[in-house]
Amino acid sequence: MIIGWIGLGNMGIPMASNLLAAGYDVRVWNRTPGKAASLVALGAKVTATLSELVAQSDVLFTMVSDDDAVKAIYTDSDGLLSLPVQGKLAVDMSTISPDTSRFLSEQAKQAGLRFLDAPVSGSVGPAKEGKLVIMVGGEQADYEVAKPMLDKLGKAAFYLGPNGAGTSAKLAINLLLGITVQGVSETLLFARSLGIGTEQMLDIISESAVGTPLIRGKAASILADDYPAAFALKHMAKDLRLAHEAGVSTPLAESVNATYRHALESGLGELDLMAILRHLDG
Ligand code: NA7
């Protein structure tokens, strides 16, 4: 089973590394060349074009930014669906809208390409450790084929039903993530206004019933006011926008969606989502 991996961003590189470390034969392609050095050192082969990647691969993973990026890779005139993909399996692990996942699965089906939407919960740390949580939509038989590979990327993979189910679950879990990060930020700013220091408040939160690995993991970053992207704020803003576009009543998430949109507009998009604290402190 030869893997073709598309997308070498913050998530794509550690995920492809884990497949290489597990012994898979991995070919990689990225829109911007030159990002594969660490993977080549682990044995990956770089292809110059998508066409070469498709010719050499049985399973095609995509891990790219957003709906536009995945659509470009699939439907551009030289994209995956213009190439001989019949009989292969595609696994899109990007976070995109359920509508786009369903649209692409239909287009893929017409080209004879099997398609799973399989986005992940977890940022760069869990990606490096192979401890992502993976949510899958598509045919169950295709999920079973992908499962051994997914098991090298994540600590849990959930098969949820037809195409779009994976991306739907991902929007739901990230709705909670966005709300939680803003909630922690407001809690810390509120406490500080009442004279309780941030370090002390973080310790209190960590020991309390609402203390989570997420908050404990962000504590050092918060205290240093330094936010290198484990999960970029721009992607969180995108996911909240996609959740908003689902048209379901979510009053709290609507408010949080507006906060992240404003933070994005003020230029914080490349920082970690925890930089929402800096935005609110502004
Ligand atoms: P990054 O680090 O922002 O990386 C994004 C990747 O997507 C990177 O490889 C980009 O290629 C690629 N990309 C973006 N737009 C396009 C287009 N139009 N065509 C082809 N490739 C494209 O994102 P993460 O790795 O943190 O996140 C990936 C997903 O996981 C995302 O959906 C998150 O919400 C969750 P480039 O190197 O810029 O040429």
Image (cartoon, rainbow, N blue to C red):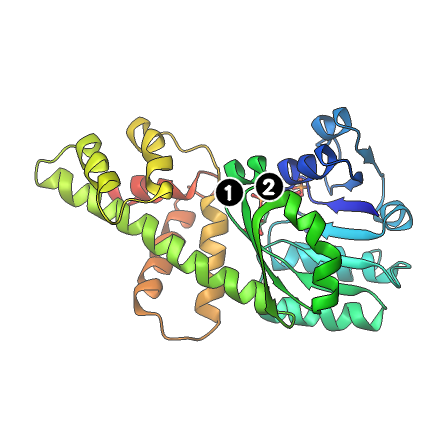
Residue behind mark 1: 123
Question: Residues at badges 1 and 2 in contact (C-beta under 8 Å)?
Answer: yes
The relative height of residue 116 versus residue 121 in the rendered view (above or below) is: below
Residue 12 on image: x %, y %: 65, 41
Element class at badge 1: loop
Residue shown at the point (60%, 50%) measured from the top left:
65
Residue 253 on image: x %, y %: 35, 63
Task: Specify whether residue 62 is in view.
Answer: no
User: Is the distance from the Cβ of mark 2 to the nearest ligand 1 atom less than 8 Å?
Assistant: yes
User: Is the distance from the Cβ of mark 1 to the nearest ligand 1 atom less than 8 Å?
Assistant: yes
Task: Specify whether residue 25 is in view.
Answer: yes
Residue shown at the point (32%, 26%) measured from the top left:
224
Element class at badge 2: loop
Residue behind mark 2: 11
Q: Is residue 272 left or right of residue 8?
A: left
Q: What amino acid is at disc 2?
A: Met
Q: Where the C terminus falls, by quadrant?
A: top left
| Residue closest to the eye, 227 or 122 | 122
Q: Is residue 110 left or right of residue 274?
A: right
